[in-house]
Amino acid sequence: MAATGGGSGACFVLGASGETGRALLRELLARQLFARVTLIGRRRLSLGEETGAAVEQAVVDFERLGEHAAAFQGHDVGFCCLGTTRAKAGAAGFVRVDRDYVAQAAELARAGGCKHFVLQSSQGANQHSRFLYLRVKGEVENLVQAVGFDRCTILRPAVLLCKRQESRPTEWMAQQFLGIVARVFPTAYSVPVETVARAMVASVLQPGEGKVEVLENGAIHKLGKAVPQQGT
């Protein structure tokens, strides 16, 4: 798909409740790229009336994801921002969400006709890493690639800059520090979630460079700028 708007086709978003997922949904709706956007998650999200009839929500049990194959049918593009943290879910829970859920969702999406899968991963993802987070991210990248989509785009952002609705003091301080660093080294150590969202959209709008494309943090910044912000 390389359209510039007009609302044709359908896509789904996994992880729409997260910071990047919310930014991605705003971007998709503002550009009206798809006639139908399906949010697949464990609970319904409260959305504004401005989303209109284009947005559908499918509530699934990720522990029994195979029973929800219908939710993944009929989409041209799949966007995945699904993830948790070890602090929230524990080591086993983190692996289950960030690797197992994502890999199974990719398989269901491919079986349901999805041609292009866009995955948010992480800078430093490596299946051989000694660090659990980076190792799991590397493993899920390999699993998604093995599914066999016509196109697979993997984004590896550095530290995500965002304005959380509920932020702990330490998180706020870290965000402020990284914001200062970003002014000096704008593409090295961090990236705003809005830029990641625009890059995910741009990857769909532009022709790919091969069946699998991996975008590191610098490329995410560049691609995110390739699609102008709405209202500019």
Image (cartoon, grey):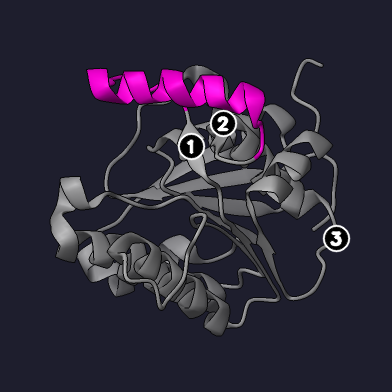
Q: Secondary structure at mark 1?
A: strand
Which label's residue is closer to the chain start, 1 or 3? 1
- Residue with the mark numbered 1: 160
Q: Is 80 positioned to the left or the right of 87 in the image? A: right
The image quadrant where one finds the C terminus is top right
- Residue with the mark numbered 2: 192
Disc 3 crowd, CA 10 A, few/some/many (<14, 14-19, 20+): few
Q: Nearer the viewer, residue 35 or 117?
A: 117
Work out whether residue 113 can be spotted. Answer: yes
Q: Is 184 positioned to the left or the right of 206 in the image? A: left
Q: Is 76 positioned to the left or the right of 78 in the image? A: right
Identify the residue at image location x=41%, y=47%. Answer: 15
- Residue with the mark numbered 3: 207
Please provide the residue range marked out in magenta. Answer: 162-187
| Kind of residue indicated by mark 3 | Pro
Which label's residue is closer to the chain start, 3 or 2? 2
| Kind of residue indicated by mark 1 | Leu
Q: Is 54 positioned to the left or the right of 170 in the image? A: right
Identify the residue at image location x=40%, y=52%. Answer: 82
The image quadrant where one finds the N terminus is bottom right
Disc 2 crowd, CA 10 A, few/some/many (<14, 14-19, 20+): many
Which label's residue is closer to the chain start, 1 or 2? 1
Q: Nearer the viewer, residue 132 or 108?
A: 132
Q: Is residue 87 positioned above or below 129 on the image?
A: above
Quarter where residue 129 is shown: bottom left
Q: Is residue 176 positioned above or below 103 on the image?
A: above
Give how far apart the Cα atoms at labels 1 and 3 are. 26 Å
Cβ atoms at labels 1 and 2 below 8 Å apart: yes
Q: Main secondary structure of the magenta part?
A: helix
| Kind of residue indicated by mark 2 | Pro
> Is residue 95 part of the magenta span, yes or no?
no
